[in-house]
Amino acid sequence: MTSLYSRELEIAQLAVQRASILTKRVFHETSKGTVSKDDASPVTIGDFGAQALIISALKHNFPHDEIVAEEEATELRAYPPLRDQIWELVRTTSLDDVAAEGLLGGGIKDADAMLDIIDQGNSKGGKVGRVWTIDPIDGTKGFLRGGQYAVCLALLQDGDVKVGAIGCPNLPVDDAAPLTADIGANATDDEGRGVLFSAVIGQGATSRPLKAGALAEGRSISMKPLTDMSNASFCESVEAGHSNQSESAQIAQKLGITKQSVRMDSQAKYGSIARGAGDIYLRLPTSKTYQEKIWDHAAGDLIVREAGGEVTDIKGNRLNFGVGRTLATNSGVIAAPKAVHSQVLSVVQEVLGVK
Ligand SMILES: Nc1ncnc2c1ncn2[C@@H]1O[C@H](COP(=O)(O)O)[C@@H](O)[C@H]1OP(=O)(O)O
Ligand SMILES: [Mg+2]
Ligand SMILES: [Mg+2]
Ligand SMILES: [Mg+2]
């Protein structure tokens, strides 16, 4: 008997793997075709190209599903040279396993079809039916800095995350490697790096080497049992504008955490705590108006929960992915092993003055 969501999981993992190949090609280029979006955040040819490849694979396999993806093609329609640069990448990126590439439906017809595909990620989301959510490059700032980034994909059914996959090309492949955002002295050498995290609701979480063809063998991952807070490692954003780092330092001190935080871009943080490399992920609001996006958290939320963790916002509520493209009803994120989550939450609330 095939297990629930097995086909969705396979396609999600392969789609993330293929998009990751494209992002790696851009990562190693000095010119990444960066443009600024309306909210002043950066986007690169890698983000657009990865989104095109993932949506194309989803539409081939699940034509009736809705898709909420981060990017849209307006800028590319207005500026053909950028479109052509992306098309060149998309046209020449495929999995090196013919059967796996066939499962994704192969390539895209032409540059105009690619633009239409990118724009198919414009669903409003919501709590009804099947909705995929895509962050083609999460942590674009980390990607540009030569640090961590992630290719993220999740399936929501009636607002609940059922399947999640996160490709982290720059994390160590070894689940037992120490927690660090560093990618080593030789950023042009991928040796020992590249991991694909995934989970299906009720079936646990897995990691495997991120390959260029068929999926590698998976291994089950779980959070580290945390008995002594003084040994805990916690991770947070590199960008001070994404998470309040002075409040997190106060929280860590009150919890008795002695280690410095590890600052890492993207959902690589969720993957890192899910496999026990780190213990706690804190994301503390920096503004009253910013709403977290569902594509920034859906896959990570499921992977951490399936690895034995609990994920809530600073009020202690589960993240609610069923209210649209953003987590409009949540504020911040606290991810920790189940056994200590309430302890962490109460210190967060004390420091932030949350009732
Ligand atoms: N003010 C903000 N608060 C929290 N997250 C933000 C903020 N501005 C942008 N982000 C998002 O944080 C994510 C990266 O988080 P991290 O710091 O964990 O790497 C990005 O997806 C980024 O969105 P965007 O893609 O629109 O730039
Ligand atoms: Mg993101
Ligand atoms: Mg992104
Ligand atoms: Mg972005």
Image (cartoon, helix red, strand yellow):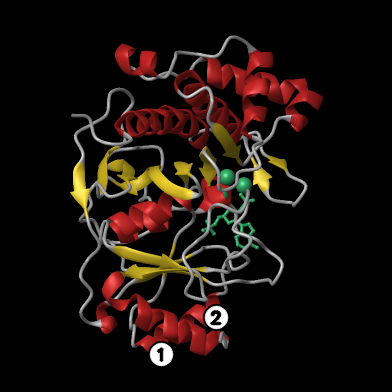
82 sits to left or right of 134? right
What's the distance in space between the residues labelled 2 and 1, CA to CA?
13 Å
Local packing at callout 2 (Cα closer than 10 Å; few below 14, some 14-19, many 20+) is few
Indicate which disc, 2 or 1, sits on the residue closer to the N terminus.
2
Q: Nearer the viewer, residue 125 or 109?
A: 125
Query: Which residue is labeled 2 in the image?
Result: 246
Residue 8 visible somewhere in the drawing? yes
- Name which residue type carries label 2: Ser
Pointer 1 residue: 254
In the rendered image of this protein, does residue 217 appear above or below residue 297? Answer: above
Identity of the residue drawn at 64% across and 37% down:
123
Q: Position of residue 2 (x, y in %)?
A: 22, 30
326 lies left or right of 348: right
Residue 254 lies, in percent from the top left, at 41, 90
In the rendered image, residue 313, in percent from the top left (x then y), is placed at 50, 69
Query: At x 52% / y 59%, what residue is drawn?
Result: 320
**Residue 5 image-quadrant placement:** top left
Quarter of the C terminus within the rendering: bottom right
Density class for disc 1 (Cα within 10 Å; few <14, some 14-19, many ≥20) is: some
Query: Which residue is most to the right?
Result: 78
User: Under tag 2, what secondary structure?
Assistant: helix
Cβ of mark 1 under 8 Å from ligand 1: the answer is: no
**In front: label 2 or label 1:** 1
Amino acid type, label 1: Lys
Q: Position of residue 125 (x, y in %)?
A: 60, 43
Q: SS at mark 1? A: helix
- Of 104 and 142, nearer the camera is 104
Give the quarter the ligand 3 occupies.
Answer: top right
